[in-house]
Amino acid sequence: MESSTARARDEYFVQVYRQLRQAARNARSANPQQTMNTTALVNEAWLKLEQTNAAANDRMHYLKTAALAMRQLLVDYARYRGAEKRDRAMELPLFEELLPGTDHGAADDVLALEDALGELEALDPRGAEIVVLRFFGGATLEEAAELMDTSRRSAARDWARARAFLRTRLAS
């Protein structure tokens, strides 16, 4: 018998699936060397959410949680790909089935983004949150504002400030 929480999560996943695929596609297109395919990224995010067995209050809460899961997966994958010595016992579901490739440029880019996001989180948590929602979750500015419980105008300012910060950090 399936619990109501699991059923709700499944319904929300179906509702945000296209949006998550588009966000994954965008994240990958920003990093052309990225070897993790879009379907694998979205499916891994779903698996991660299922394993946590967390409750999803509504569609927007699920989208926010899925965006964080996709961010974590991309960073984990970049670390896995960029490691000089891999622990062979380390299990990363579906990663073994991804397209082969040895270029570590994409891994370096994702790790640089993660470092810059970490700095941004320390300085401007709202700015970091909107980046995660928009970049990893595919949320529109309006959806991000709703998720952050702020006005669209404030979200637009946070987004502009965060993008400027990341551009500066990633350019250096």
Image: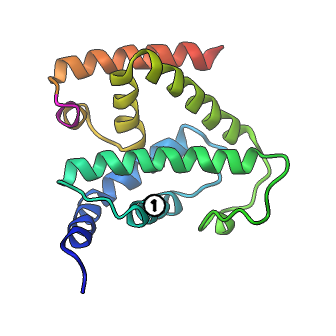
Picture coordinates of residue 67 (x, y %)? 38, 46
* Residue 57 appearing in the image: yes
Q: Is residue 126 located in the magenta-colored stretch of the structure? A: no
Residue 135 in which image quadrant: top left
Which of these two is toward me, 41 or 32?
A: 41
Residue 134 in which image quadrant: top left
Task: Give the SS element for disc 1.
Answer: helix
Magenta stretch: dominant secondary structure: helix
Which of these two is toward me, 101 or 63?
A: 63
- In the displayed structure image, the side of residue 125 where residue 168 appears, left or right: right
- Badge count: 1
Q: Is residue 121 above or below residue 69?
A: above
Q: Which residues are magenta?
A: 145-149
Identify residue for label 1.
48
Picture coordinates of residue 50 (x, y %)? 39, 66
Residue type at the position of mark 1: Lys
* Residue 34 appearing in the image: no
Residue displayed at 64% across by 35% down: 111
Which of these two is toward me, 129 or 28?
A: 129
Residue displayed at 50% across by 57% down: 41
Q: Is residue 12 above or below residue 107?
A: below
Which of these two is toward me, 61 or 113?
A: 61
Which quadrant, please, contains the N terminus?
bottom left
Residue at the outermost bottom position: 1
Which quadrant, please, contains the C terminus?
top right
Residue displayed at 56% across by 58% down: 37
Residue 124 in which image quadrant: top left
Picture coordinates of residue 49 (x, y %)? 39, 60
Picture coordinates of residue 46 (x, y %)? 41, 63
Question: Dot 1, crowdedness within 10 Å: few (<14), some or many (≥20)?
Answer: some
Residue displayed at 85% across by 51% down: 85
